[in-house]
Amino acid sequence: MTAEEILSCLDEHTHQLPVLQNAYFEYVDARMTVFRSSKHWAIVFEMVAFADRLMEFGNYIYGVGNSIKNGFVEVSSTLFSYCEDAPLWNFETGKWLGDKASFCIVLGDTPKSFAPSDAEYTAAGIHLESETKGVGSLGPAHLLRYLCHHLQHPFFASNSDLNKLVDADTHKMDIFLQTQDWRHPNLFGNDDANEFFSNIDSIRILANAIKTGDLLVWNQQDSTEFNTDWHKMEAQRKVNELYEADQQELKAQLGPILPSVSIVEVIYEEDERPTGQSN
């Protein structure tokens, strides 16, 4: 078991993992659990999310490692069901019925009702754009974010279930690291279009830690590049939206003046290309 082998296995399965910035997969909570022994290893990624196309709240679990048959396993579980007298969906029409004033879910076999105040939403980092209450006033992702915060991250799998998933007992592996903060590959971002696990410094540190059994360097690293906190993602999304709005406004202002000139790149004739030198 070498760090290079670990990184190669992760890279091989990168495209089988979900990306965090996905229009059809509203990610809310994540956890990474690392197992190791002297010869075997496995990393389990859990993504608690709302899958738009499936209209489903789930914990989507992906395991990678040499303890797993074919190096990869994928399972999922539904987070909760709906109260009959206060459903969150009209499945006949496909209409979402979430109301920020109050809602109900069935967790296990137990119905649970919630009536969050504005202060409770704010404490969860949720800033609702509309003051209006009623049907549709609380989107699926915001509802799930509130539940994860208020119930203190209740939707992750049990450690015993994770042990079974990666065959930890057979390979005498123990949990080496469990964290909600790491840098996950972003395959759809403009700057990270070709990003794989082996390109990420913190994952290279992790691979060495798995090999040596020592987390000292992992624990001492700069975590500012970690990207699994949805608050950071939401802030970046707003920055991107403002940038796009500014670009559209600039295009509208310059369009009538320079209709044939690209805002992004001005194209010069070869003999007119600026050189930065004066005669």
Image (cartoon, helix red, strand yellow):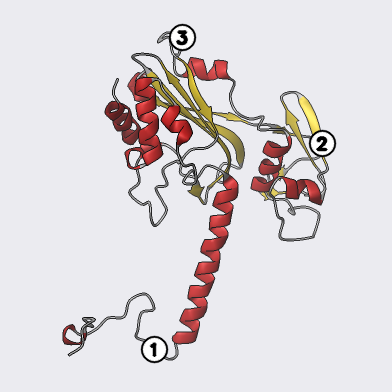
- Is residue 53 at least partly visible in the picture? yes
Q: Name the residue under label 2.
A: 113
Judging by the rendered image, the residue that carries numbered circle 1 is 258
Task: Please give the name of the residue rendered at 40% of the width and 10% of the height, measured from the top-left corner.
Answer: 171
Residue in front for this viewpoint, 254 or 113: 254
Q: Is mark 3 on a helix, strand or loop?
A: loop
- Left or right: 163 in relation to 279: right
Image coordinates of residue 132 in percent, x first then y, are 80, 59
- Residue on which disc 3 sits: 169
Residue at coordinates 42% horizontally, 8% vertically from top-left? 170
Label 2 or label 3, whichever comes before in sequence order = 2
At label 3, counting other C-alpha atoms closer than 10 Å, the crowd grade (few under 14, some 14-19, many 20 or more) is few
* Residue sitting nearer the eye, 156 or 58: 156
Q: Position of residue 201 (x, y in %)?
A: 37, 40
Mark 1 vs mark 2: in front:
1
Amino acid tagged 1: Leu
Q: Quadrant of the C terminus?
A: bottom left
Compare residues 273 and 107 and report the one nearer the observer.
Answer: 273
Mark 1–mark 3 contact, CB under 8 Å? no
Numbered disc 1: secondary structure: loop
Q: What residue type is labelled 3?
A: Asp
Dot 1 crowding, Cα within 10 Å, few <14, some 14–19, many 20+: few
In this picture, is 172 found above or below 263?
A: above
Question: Can you tell which quarter of the image residue 115 is in?
Answer: top right
Left or right relative to 115: residue 40: left
Q: Which of marks 1 and 3 is nearer the N terminus?
A: 3
Q: Which residue is drawn at 52% across and 78% down?
A: 249
